[in-house]
């Protein structure tokens, strides 16, 4: 397995977006042949592709993207491997218990929800992903998690109006990353005793509800002597 893994979907014209969000268009604005340089023109929403949600996304009184500390967007990660769930099946606290048992004491890092749903990217079935119950979101907050990332269109059911999991996580000052890919590889790395670190730095958009990210992971060498429940091992510097 490579040490670095790209967790981002490509940004291309017509890519999937959440229902009602702006369509993504990528066109050439300048070319070397005509202008001496190549420059792309991008038309997209703040929630396009692999992106993060700030609390402001669901409540105007909550922090915007640039109000959040940079450490929200990077750190040691624990994978909740919930692959195998059916379409639209809820992710319950019981599903999360093994991953929560890997968290060490004190503030937790990044919790990755590996649903396997990135395999359906670009198909109608992508919107039928499993989703996080409010009770599960609260269990994550109680465990100290403030950054949750998922390989699906949303942590809530797509098309729902209430967004309860968003409200629980964002109400605690957390951020949510969506539309990741490659989390299956991180689940396998974790099972092999390899530590995982994730980077989710967004574009610097003042006052924003969220922004696209180039999500990436760094996987370390297997850590000897680790045991379930012993905390998430740290990567070497």
Image: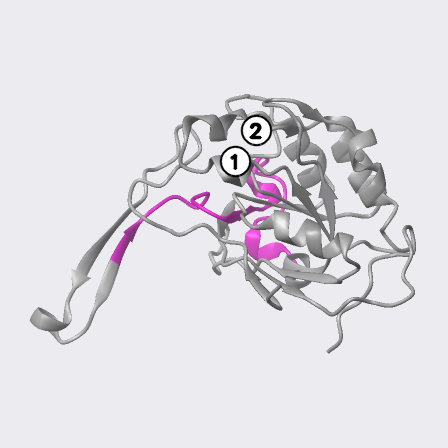
Residue where numbered disc 1 is placed: 153
Can see residue 157?
A: yes
Residue 137: image location, x then y, percent:
74, 34
Residue 39: image location, x then y, percent:
23, 65
Q: Is residue 116 above or below residue 35?
A: above
Task: Give the magenta range.
Answer: 41-69
Q: Is residue 194 above or below residue 102?
A: below
Instruction: Please state which of residues 36 and 207 is positioned toward the viewer in this rendering.
Output: 36
In the image, what residue occupies the spot 57% across and 28% down?
Answer: 129
Residue 45: image location, x then y, percent:
39, 43
Quadrant in the rendering for residue 74? bottom right
Residue 202: image location, x then y, percent:
52, 57
* C-alpha distance separating marks 2 and 1: 7 Å
Secondary-structure class at tag 2? loop
* Quadrant of the frame with the N terminus: bottom right
Q: Is residue 121 left or right of residue 72?
A: left
Tell whether label 1 touches label 2 (CB within 8 Å): yes
Quadrant in the rendering for residue 165? top right
In the image, what residue occupies the spot 67% across and 57% down?
Answer: 72
Q: Is residue 43 above or below residue 32?
A: above
Circle 2 residues within 10 Å: few <14, some 14–19, many ≥20:
many
Instruction: Please state which of residues 226 and 32 is positioned toward the viewer in this rendering.
Output: 226
Can see residue 208?
A: no
Dot in front, 2 or 1? 2
Secondary-structure class at tag 1? loop
* Quadrant of the frame with the C terminus: bottom right
Residue where numbered disc 2 is placed: 129
């Amino acid at each position: 397995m490579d040490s670095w893994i790209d967790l981002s979907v490509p940004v291309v014209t017509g890519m999937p977006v959440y229902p009602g969000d702006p369509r993504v268009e990528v066109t050439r604005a300048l070319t070397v042949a005509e202008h001496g340089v190549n420059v792309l023109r991008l038309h997209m929403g703040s929630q396009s592709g692999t992106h993060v949600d700030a609390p402001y996304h669901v409540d105007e009184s909550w922090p915007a993207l640039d109000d959040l500390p940079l450490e929200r967007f990077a750190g040691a990660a624990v994978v909740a491997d919930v692959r195998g769930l059916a379409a639209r099946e809820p992710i319950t606290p019981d599903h999360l218990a093994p991953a929560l048992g890997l968290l060490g004491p004190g503030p937790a890092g990044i919790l990755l929800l590996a649903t396997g749903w990135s395999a359906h990217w670009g198909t109608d079935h992508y919107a039928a992903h499993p989703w996080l119950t409010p009770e599960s979101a609260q269990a994550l907050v109680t465990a100290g998690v403030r950054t949750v990332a998922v390989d699906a269109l949303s942590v809530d059911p797509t098309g729902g109006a209430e967004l309860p999991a968003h409200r629980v996580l964002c109400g605690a000052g957390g951020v949510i990353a969506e539309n990741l890919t490659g989390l299956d590889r991180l689940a396998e790395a974790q099972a092999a005793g390899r530590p995982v670190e994730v980077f989710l730095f967004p574009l610097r958009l003042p006052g924003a509800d969220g922004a696209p990210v180039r999500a990436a992971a760094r996987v370390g060498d297997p850590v000897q002597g680790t045991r379930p429940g012993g905390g998430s091992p740290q990567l070497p510097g």
